[in-house]
Amino acid sequence: MSPLTLVWANLKRKKLRTVFTLGSVAVAFLLFAFLGALGRAFSVGLEIAGADRLITMHKVSFIEPLPLAYVNRVRNLEGVAEVSHQSWFGAYYQDPKQQFGLFPVEFDAQSEVYPEYKVSPEQWESLLNTQAGLMLGRAMANQLQVEVGDRIPLSSTIWSQQDGNQTWDFEVAAIYEGKADGSDEMQGFMHYDYFNESRSFGRDAVGWLVTKIEDPERAPEISAAIDAMFANSPTETKTSDEEGWAAGFAAQIGNISLIVRAVLGCVFFTLLLVAGNTMAQAVRERTGELAVLKTIGFGDGRILRMVLAESLTIALLGGVIGLLLGFGFVAAVRPGVAQFLPGLAVPPNALVIGIVLAVLLGLVTGLLPGIRAMRLKVVDALARI
């Protein structure tokens, strides 16, 4: 009889216990995949942040506007390649609870600052020639169920037109796709001139500036120069690189990476205790059988390998099931939460790390029972029967 046959027979001995143990392992690895995806969703902004982009906002608060005139003043600084600006519009379609990021921009400057947003030449030309043209990310367009050429009314929780109407008419002129992995496709952009000429208040103001610089190594120097330019003015500024700006928003939520690691640590420690106890109990129940195997010629090393094989089988099988369920779960919930967590996706290395963790789990939980089985004396074992 081969060792694999014995391993399979032992796993079927207590079917319910084996199923529950596999379930525990699978749930742990499902959480591993989901929490990994959650952690990535909060950090993906840092991963794709441009090293050559600076964000300039009001020194007092992010919600305070900046004068439009700041754009050209920053653009004339040495080392600056291009300057774009954005403002929060607060758009929603039909349901006010389903807001998404819609930003009035100057599209020519925007395309230079964010070259990772890819649009076909035909759609780009149409966008530039359509005053009420709207450019949506592919994921956002799919959620709104619109295509290029569709007309769509969007309402704002903040901005009204001069007639008091808070519903703005747009034509979907372009749909972009993010070139970088994790690029935010759950947002949209509109013409700043259309927005600025139609709004009832706040004319000639913008939310923040996005500056593309020629040399990323000069980011601290140029940031200081921008803030010095507007120092002691009625509207002082605070400038940081895009990664630092994104990290500041993430920090308002908390150290997500630490929280994820802490939860996973607790889950796997509990799993270690459960699986280890299961393996120890399984070996104790087979004391007499192990003695018989040793009597007919099974060596200590072979006994150890057999116990480890059983433990590894449970860990690997449960781990693979859990990882596959985790990938499927994340894929299922991603469309529903993409508006808030556009980067939600299981990390590319999660499968490899998960398999390694499963192997380690199987070795750790099976090692001690295996050593006890290996050291078992035939006389002592038969005496317990």
Image (cartoon, grey):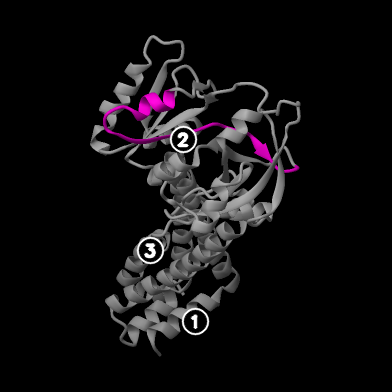
Q: Residues within 10 Å of mark 3 (few under 14, many from 20)?
A: few
* Pick the front one: 234 or 82: 82
**Foreground tag (2 vs 1):** 2
> Which contiguous range is marked in magenta?
70-94
User: Dividing the picture into quarters, in which one does residue 191 lie?
Assistant: top right
First in sequence, mark 2 or 3: give its number. 2
Magenta segment includes 75: yes
Residue 250 is tagged as 2
* Residue 187 locus on image (x, y percent): 57, 45
Question: From the viewer's perspective, is residue 111 above or below residue 5?
Answer: above
> Which type of secondary structure does the marked residue at label 2 adopt?
helix
Residue 284 position in % (x across, y down): 45, 68
Q: Secondary structure at mark 1?
A: helix
Q: Residues within 10 Å of mark 2 (few under 14, many from 20)?
A: some
Task: Name the residue type under label 1.
Answer: Ala
Residue 40 x, y percent position in the rendering: 45, 48
Counting every numbered tag in the picture gives 3
Q: What's the CA distance linking mark 1 and mark 3?
A: 29 Å
Question: Disc number at residue 352?
Answer: 3
Residue 264 included in the magenta stretch of the image = no
